[in-house]
Amino acid sequence: MRKPIIAGNWKMHQTPAQAKALAQEIRAGLNQTVLSEREVILCPPFVDLTVVEEAVRGSGIGLGAQNFYPKEEGAFTGEISAPMLKELGVTYVIIGHSERRQHFREDDDFVNQKVLSALKNGLKPILCVGERLDEMEANLTEKRIETQLTGGLKDVSPEGLSSMVVAYEPVWAIGTGKNATPRQARDVHRFIRGWIAAKFGEGPADRLRIQYGGSVKAENAASLLTQPDIDGALVGGASLSADSFLAIVKY
Ligand code: PGA
């Protein structure tokens, strides 16, 4: 049985004071019963990690980072390493988000360096894959995802894969209010699991959690997250309000 994992990607929102209040509100809305059935992760901006960690400590809510640089230390002005995140209590890290691919030109090779660095340093990667609108319209969804998986998971062992999560996020659905239909999402999730099975074997594929992301809201969470092969959600906009995030967690 795969435990659904719901992660809130706050993106570049929330000052530390706002982040603390939001994390406290989310914590207050979750009890142990919910958290025994759902894994809940908050991914605030770097500067909020400490206050959010304090706000959720001991609750079972996990902490994720939105990014990091795949070297342990060195002359990389402005960057943050995996060991730094670990020390703050971070367990997950989002890698290969389409906004980083698009605005910061991150390619599959760099994504792969991050996956390997995260695994080496004991962080669990949430590897994001997904096609753009033009690719979807040209029927290139599977091809695009296959390329991203091949590149992103290069040199990853089955043991490494076992601490990973994959997030399917069609780029055309992110922040647009246009989500994939449950059927569209289900088909792509099935494709991803099949690809993983062919590369890593049935067992690892069966255990891998694959989240859906892209305009997940309280109103569509249940229809998406009850599909076979969809094991949770990576939530952007709707994770910035405790009410809507909690409603998604409790879909
Ligand atoms: P959205 O973002 O829920 O605002 O569409 C999802 C994401 O980018 O992870």
Image (cartoon, grey):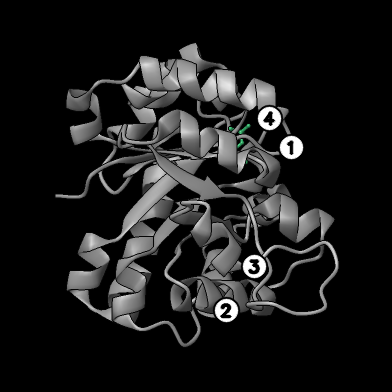
Alpha carbon separation for disc pair 1 and 4? 12 Å
Alpha carbon separation for disc pair 2 and 4? 35 Å
Element at label 4: helix
Circle 1 is placed at which residue position?
12
Which x, y percent locates residue 123?
45, 64
Towards the viewer: 4 or 192: 4
Tell me the residue at 57%/34% (across/down).
51
Quarter of the figure that contains the C terminus: top left
Query: Mark 1, residues whose alpha carbon is within 10 Å: few (<14), some, or many (≥20)?
Result: few
Q: What number is the disc on residue 151?
A: 2
Q: How many marks?
A: 4
Instruction: Look at the numbered discs 3 and 4 and tell me whether their residues touch, using CB distance below 8 Å.
Output: no
Q: Is residue 43 above or below residue 154?
A: above
Circle 3 is placed at which residue position?
81
Q: Quadrant of ligand 1?
A: top right
Q: Is residue 100 above or below residue 177?
A: below
Alpha carbon separation for disc pair 2 and 1? 27 Å
Which x, y percent locates residue 33?
17, 25
